[in-house]
């Protein structure tokens, strides 16, 4: 038996249920930020950029230190090679030569691998034989000065050129004063200077 009321009630119940049913939730919003893969790629790129920047910084620092070491080595070499001068017919160390030798002494203490040759010279006055002997006395007096402060004498050698290698020409006191000298030649350990 067909009951229209029952059908109507059922229809109304279905309609109310449909009308009262909540709407399905909206879909989640599309992601607006980077994906995990993009984040990882960015992290790797940042790490590489940071490592490259650090490598550039270290290279610049090394270059700066190398320049400073080279300049320091140049200054040390210049001090070691600075000549000392002597009075006429003398091999005694003058006061001005003493201060130069003391500066050399400090460097030679700091760099025990440095070896040197002292080259004695004389002006043109006197015989060749006498001037060779005088040049040798001058070179030996410098070595004696340095070894007197505790440096090992095996680090030094001497040679005399007498009057044969003048640095100033002329037969006057100005030229002679420049030619009465000891020159210093680094014969070993120069590469250690400045380290």
Image: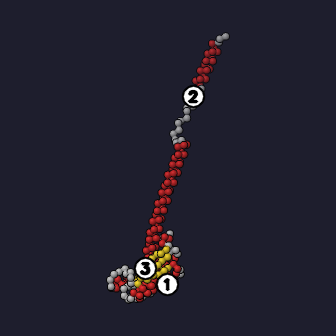
Residue, x 47% and y 78% (percent of image)? 117
Alpha-carbon span between mark 3 and mark 2: 103 Å
Residue furthest right as drawn: 1
* Tag 2 secondary structure: loop
Front position in the image: 42 or 79: 79
Q: Where is mark 1, residue-wise?
A: 144
Q: Where is mark 3, residue-wise?
A: 183
Q: Where is mark 2, residue-wise?
A: 23
Q: How many marks?
A: 3
* N-terminal-most mark, 2 or 1: 2
Residue, x 52% and y 81% (percent of image)? 153
Tag nearer the camera, 3 or 2: 3
Residue, x 48% and y 72% (percent of image)? 190
Alpha-carbon span between mark 1 and mark 3: 15 Å
Quadrant for the N terminus in the image: top right
* N-terminal-most mark, 1 or 3: 1
Q: Is residue 47 left or right of residue 138?
A: right
In the image, is residue 133 above or below residue 155? below
* Tag 1 secondary structure: helix
Contact between marks 3 and 2 (CB within 8 A): the answer is: no
Label 3 crowd (10 A; few <14 / some 14-19 / many >=20): some
Tag nearer the camera, 2 or 1: 1
Front position in the image: 15 or 137: 137
Q: Is residue 85 visible?
A: no
Q: Is residue 8 visible?
A: yes
Front position in the image: 34 or 125: 125
**Where in the figure is residue 164, as x and y percent of width and height?**
38, 82
**Where in the figure is residue 193, as x and y percent of width and height?**
48, 71
Label 2 crowd (10 A; few <14 / some 14-19 / many >=20): few
**Where in the figure is residue 120, as x and y percent of width and height?**
43, 82
In the image, is residue 60 above or below residue 1? below
């Amino acid at each position: 038996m067909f009951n229209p009321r029952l059908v109507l009630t059922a229809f109304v119940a279905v309609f109310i249920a449909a009308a009262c049913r909540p709407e399905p939730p909206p879909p989640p919003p599309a992601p607006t930020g980077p994906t995990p893969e993009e984040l990882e790629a960015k992290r790797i790129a940042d790490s590489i950029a940071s490592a490259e920047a650090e490598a550039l910084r270290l290279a610049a620092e090394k270059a700066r230190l190398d320049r400073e070491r080279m300049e320091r080595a140049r200054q040390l070499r210049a001090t070691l090679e600075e000549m000392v001068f002597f009075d006429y017919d003398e091999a005694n160390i003058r006061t001005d030569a003493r201060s130069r030798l003391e500066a050399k002494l400090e460097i030679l203490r700091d760099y025990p691998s440095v070896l040197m040759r002292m080259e004695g010279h004389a002006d043109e006055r006197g015989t060749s034989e006498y001037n060779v002997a005088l040049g040798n006395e001058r070179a030996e007096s410098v070595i004696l000065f340095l070894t007197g402060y505790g440096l090992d004498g095996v680090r030094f050698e001497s040679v005399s050129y007498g009057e044969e290698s003048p640095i100033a020409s002329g037969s006057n006191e100005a030229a002679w004063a420049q030619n009465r000298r000891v020159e210093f030649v680094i014969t070993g350990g120069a590469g250690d200077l400045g380290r």
